[in-house]
Image: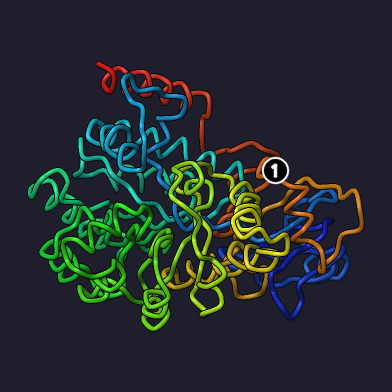
Amino acid sequence: MKKLIGNGSLITRDPKNPWIQDGCVCIEDQMIVDVGERRALLAKYPDAQWLDARGGVVMPGFINTHHHIYSALARGMSIKDHHPKNFGDILEGMWWRLDRLLTLEDCRCSAYATYLSCLRNGVTTVFDHHASYGATEGSLFEISAAAHELGIRTCLCYEVSDRNGPEAMRQAVRENEAFIKAAAADPSGMQRGMMGLHASFTLSDATLDDCAARTPAGAGFHIHVAEGLEDVYDSLKKYNKRIVNRLFDRKILGPKTLAIHCIHIDPQEIRILKDTDTMVVHNPESNMGNAVGCEPMPALMEKGILLGLGTDGYTSDMLESYKVANLIHKHHLGDPNAAWGEVPRMLFENNAAIANRFFERPLGKLKAGCSADVIVCDYDPLTPMDGSNCNSHILFGMSGGCVNTVIIDGKIRMQDRQIPEADEAEIMAKCREQARSLWRRING
């Protein structure tokens, strides 16, 4: 049965038809089959199920190109005797300490909590980078099961690292291999797998070569690159080359590779990223919170690198990341004109282009032939709003909490802020129980 979502302003992200004042979207099965004026589509499809946007804003679902689901249970946690002075201290004293204690039940709860938060913030596709060295085998499948149940499109990987020894590294590689194979065989087309890599400074040449040899064609790599200066110094000291050069030599770069952060890179490394068609993901809140610096976004965009926007586990609200990205470059460059065009391009265009390298059905537009990932936001503009200024309205007037309805792959996953597939009270109670257990383990 067809569905019609209308009686609202449409932001289509289709350059040929970007804005429809009183618009409507027609969905059949998993696909958008028609987009147009509300009255015209109501007349054309009189028997369709009607979903009333009630004067809100209808747009494509958001895409998060770098998340860390495993960090969910750390919210509000304090670790005794942990007083980090730099990024290395943050990793060793908090995140690596946490991931070595995670159980499969912790992973499961983190996944449900994070995906529920994604739904509530209108995020319909998530690229996640996972680590749980306390329970590696089966961890991606726990996350996958939560995504399937809640209906979110997701691309998963496990963080391979040498930091816990050779056997732990091999288990991580095997978990990636198993999930990549399972996701590729999933008939829903809603999940994909990648080979996850931590960062250059925790990966030997032998490990990188092994991962490159064991990654199926088309899966690609998801790796943190030059996030902190420690990573750069390590590569120069051990290998006498900068990080991007090293990854190029080890055959890690390419059109299916997500290079996350890329803060401390030079012009020659930027050229390599461009020449290899490697994708980069910017995570402004995380970069500010970890005090690691500001990504050279203008230089990356000027070279034509496909640059997306993520959250790095800080939030599941992509509009929060959108706002911070708009500010960090203005502040960093001392230029109030910086980032006005680049940041919305990252969120609304490039994230979809990144996802479209992995998922078969086109994402990111309200257009016939695209996957039916549609959100409705409660937003009554204070000032005139149209296709020429809608990005500014989103920036200054909306947050993820404005989202009231989410459709993913043609199915209603949230309506009027209610999520029918989940008992949220039960899930949250279980998450709180697991969080208490995890905090005791960390501080015990």
List the single residue furthest toward the left: 167
Q: Which residue is mark 1?
A: 404
Q: Tell me which residue sits at (49%, 51%) in the image.
A: 152
Which residue sits at x=52%, y=79%? 304
- In terms of image quadrants, where is residue 69? top left
Q: Is residue 395 left or right of residue 206?
A: right
What crowding class fits label 1: few (fewer than 14 Cα within 10 Å), some (14-19), or many (20 or more)? many
Q: Residue at x 77, y 58 (%)?
A: 392
Q: Who is closer to the viewer here, 213 or 251?
A: 251
Q: What amino acid type is highlighted by mark number 1? A: Asn
Q: Determine whether 44 is above or below 121 in the image.
A: below
Q: Which SS class for mark 1? A: strand
- 218 over 221 or under it: above or below: below
Image x and y of residue 177, in percent: 20, 60
| Res. 264 in view | yes
Q: Is residue 188 visible?
A: no
Residue found farthest to the bottom = 275
Relative to 131, say whether 206 is above or below. below
Quadrant of res 417: top right
Q: Nearer the viewer, residue 270 or 43?
A: 270
With 247 as the anchor, is 326 left or right in this view?
right
Q: Is 334 on the left or on the right of 298, as rendered?
A: right
The quadrant holding residue 211 is: bottom left
**Location of the N terminus (image quadrant):** bottom right
Given residues 314 and 58, the one toward you in this image is 314
Residue 192 place in picture, x, y as percent? 36, 61
Q: Position of residue 194 (x, y in %)?
A: 31, 62
